[in-house]
Image: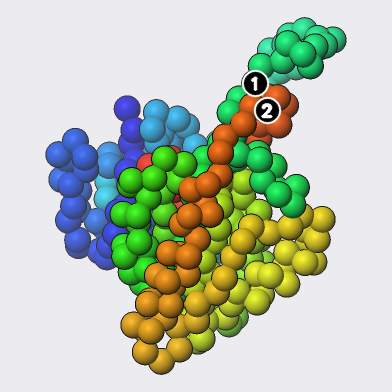
Amino acid sequence: SDNVAVATQDGTVGDSGTTQFGTSIRLNSDVPVGFRIAVEDIECGDKLLSWGNVFGVANCDIQTGEAVYNKASVDAIEVSGRITTTGITENFVDYSPKYSSDSICIANPQRIIDSKSAPKFMGYQRDGDRGIGTRNYIAVVATSSLAASCARLITQRVEHLADVLDNLNGIVCVEHTEGARANASNTDIVLSTLAGFLLHPNLAAVLLVDHSGAKVQSTNIINYLQSHHDDIVPVTNQTVIMDGDPSQSIEQGVQIVHNWIVGANSAARSAHDVSELKIALQCGGSDAFSGITGNPL
């Protein structure tokens, strides 16, 4: 069974909480939301388990209620400034299992598939070399944490529109905690991630929501696309800027999404070779909520 749990909110020394199994835990160290806490005493050398999988090895004794950190997480906290790093030290190292080449087997390495008999799937053909989508959504994307509330309110106003449509799977909000600070060390990663939504084959349109006081703006995302993916045409997109009265920005965003509904719902599935199907083989590595909270796409 797991010997750590994920914090669902920021906690400080002395706070108490309960695991999903009813176990009461009292914190003896600060822990930011998304980081893990020991739910039992862990001895130096013991493996750390989350969701039944080993992800680390303790390099010192870890007490119940103590947050667990590797070097990367300590560095990330120090850069983010979310909580003080005073007293926070690395207490586990990543677990890297050793594999033998004898345990790897390649089945049918010379297999040739006849294109006429190849499996098919029903998907949405996207223009501009974006590929084939398996779903059809409109996304409202906050370009920074400062724009998150506006993006959420716009989505709440329009998400019901997809309920009665046959070909539009939904209208989803994409919000996050980054992009606000001018001196953040992860701006390139944020730009790369947000730019990916404009290239995503599961999207029919994207509304970008800017906040005038944030570091990351939609113009930065478009410039990133032109520099790194100039061979792919982005999805239909427009920008709403939060500057002054937020209600005006919300109304503008709602109207833009309304204007996209008919076109997005007109998309139709067609048959495509399975070779066109894109399957993600690597986790985004975002945080401990990966696998707990679902990707809206």
Marked residue nearer the N-terminal end (1 or 2): 1
Secondary element at tag 1: strand
Vertically, is 18 above or below 79?
above
Secondary element at tag 2: strand
| Residue nearest the observer in this picture, 83 or 92 | 83
- Classify mark 1: residues with Cα within 10 Å, few (<14), some (14-19) or many (20+): some
**In the image, is 159 to the left or to the right of 276?**
left
Disc number placed over residue 272 in the picture, else none: 2
Question: Given contact means CB atoms under 8 Å apart, are the residues at marks 1 and 2 in contact?
Answer: yes
Judge whether residue 189 can be spotted in this image.
Answer: no
Disc number placed over residue 206 in the picture, else none: none
Vertically, is 213 above or below 158?
below
Quarter in which the N terminus is drawn: top left
Q: Residue at 77% across / 58% down in the picture?
A: 229
Q: Quadrant of residue 239?
A: bottom right
Q: Residue at 38% across / 33% down in the picture?
A: 51
Residue 166 image position (x, y, % from top left)? 41, 40
Q: Which residue is mark 1?
A: 120
Judge whether residue 121 can be spotted in this image.
Answer: yes
Residue 189 image position (x, y, % from top left)? 63, 62
Q: Residue at 79% across / 16% down in the picture?
A: 115
Vertically, is 129 above or below 178?
above
| Residue type highlighted by circle 1 | Lys
Residue 101 image position (x, y, % from top left)? 75, 17
| Residue nearest the observer in this picture, 163 or 119 | 163
**In the image, is 41 to the left or to the right of 195?**
left
Q: Residue at 43% across / 64% down in the picture?
A: 258
| Residue type highlighted by circle 2 | His
| Residue nearest the observer in this picture, 104 or 296 | 296
Give me the C-alpha separation between circle 1 and circle 2.
Answer: 5 Å
